[in-house]
Image (cartoon, coloured by chain):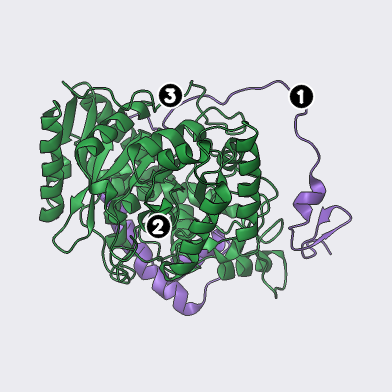
Amino acid sequence: MSYHQKTITKISADLQAGKVSSVELTQSFLDRIEKFKELNAFITVDPDFALDQAKAADANIKKGKSSALTGCPVAHKDIFCTDGLLTTCGSKILSNFVAPYDATVIKKFKTAGSVTLGKTNMDEFAMGSSNETSYYGVVKNPWDQDKVPGGSSGGSAAAVAARLAPAATGTDTGGSIRQPAALTGITGIKPSYGRVSRYGMIAFASSLDQGGIMTQTADDAALLLREMAGFDERDSTSVDQAVPDYVATLNDNLKGLKIGLPEEYFGEGLDNEVASVVEAALAEYKKLGAETVPISLPNSNLAVPCYYVLAPAEASSNLSRFDGVRYGLRAKEYTNLDDMYEKTRAEGFGAEVKRRIMIGAYALSAGYYDAYYLKAQQLRRMIADDFTEAFKKCDVIMGPVTPTTAFKIGDKTDDPVAMYLNDIYTIPVNLAGLPGMSIPAGFDKVGMPVGLHVIGQYFNEAKLLNVAHQYQQVTDWHQQIPPGFE
Amino acid sequence: MSLNNDDVKKIAHLARLALTEQESKDFAGSLSRILGLIEQMNAVDTAGIEPMAHPSDAALRLREDVVKEKDQRDAFQEIAPATEAGLYLVPRVLE
């Protein structure tokens, strides 16, 4: 079995046993990245940088100074700042930005001895659901290269699905880990808000952004999340709670598990084929001893409108830092300071980012604040309360991740509202701050992957990973590799 | 709520974004459609509901008032478009 077909859990065991070196492994993945570069999954790949880290890992393994991730290659979404490597966030405005420091997530991977394979492509500033807003070009879905991989962590998703990287980091503000994971047939977890440090993770909407991991399997996600999670004093909203050993509870029995099924997630707008895949997955869970209970999330239909006030409002404020003064692009010609700001930002940002900045600026402007921003914050409370009520009746919530499977490149680029509605099932979870996961559950009739959405209670990532792992013990959807990438 | 060209220009200036005439026209269309989506919120009565700014509703942490960061001015300014004598340069704002 070639290494690209192996999980991090297996790669780690082989590295520790001396069956393979990190240099060999890293080189084999670098070769695949080069071979399949038409997917456009990466923005930056620096083989020397990666191989230097691999050499150091090999030396540490020989000396017995290693942990589970030492020598394991991982790709990072280009939203995480990396000292010595370009960090573009998918934008032209950061096309020359080499961060002078590492994000906490990157630092944790480095400390564990993991190798940075490269920086993955993404929607510009994580604003998109198809990876089509990237300044560095659209990413192709390895299952059908005419289709999108989802977004905004589309490069990470395509890289893991095509086995160009055994795992990749992602971030999820409104679905940006779970939706691309679903559309490319991989496992992705967005932890509870506050679980993973946001320090050095370029901000889009600070009250919603959360880093997570995209892998082939739930046991890999458990292994990697255990490294990534934890309190960070450099992130003011980081939660000071001990990180449980997610791996230790993977094999807990699911007998008596109560799965809540929100009626609003199975109504109008859900594609029939996606619905039947989700129903088949639920039947599998019943065989594992779980039972289903009907629940309701009555305000979830207003999550998308609510999100498109709050996220742009926070973005308009966060993105004001890109002004051509301290780092990044500065316009070549300008007449005065205001003109420099306006031209730098006009040249540096793409259309979708400009749209969201303007929506945010409008929603926050005098006279509109109460009608838009305050109203949305009130709705956010109602949406979060719906979950609290629902979790009185169940342990986890399940449903579809997306209303349809992956769509064609270009199909929704002219209609931002149609694009936004892709995230109808994922956005409520971010608004509440709950952990959510997508696990591969099957395919539609044309062979495109479908994801099963699992939503958990605050800081109960361990239960999600356990529930996903048990399903992966009795199914093999997560082992399917797109044709041509075996 | 429908936005016209002039509304868009005003918002773009607030956000410090230079737009061409054609861009303001295009954005007027797409921004109006997004506002149409947003206004679905009006279907729900939210009177008396406490606004939620944040999932954890936590207060900001305090820390000891001690210096922990080292001076990295040179490293930070190395990536700036224009600096001089440790300062960031911008076009003249005072005559």
**Residue ID for mark 1:** B66
Mark nearer the N terminus (2 vs 3)? 2
Quadrant location of the C terminus of chain A? Answer: bottom left
Q: Which chain carries label 2?
A: A
Q: Colour of chain B?
A: purple
**Residue ID for mark 3:** A245
The percent position of residue B88, horizontal first and vertical second, equals: 79, 56
Depth check: A438 or B17 in front? A438
Q: Which amino acid does label 1 sit on?
A: Val
SS of the residue under disc 1: loop
**Residue ID for mark 2:** A154
Please report the residue visible at 43 percent of the width from the left and 34 percent of the height from the top: A223
Separation of disc 1 and disc 3 at Cα?
33 Å
The percent position of residue A36, horizontal first and vertical second, equals: 43, 67
Tell me: A21 left or right of A211. right
Do circles 1 and 3 both sit on a common chain?
A: no
Separation of disc 1 and disc 2 at Cα?
42 Å
Q: Which chain carries label 1?
A: B
Q: Which residue lies furthest to the bottom in this view?
A: B22
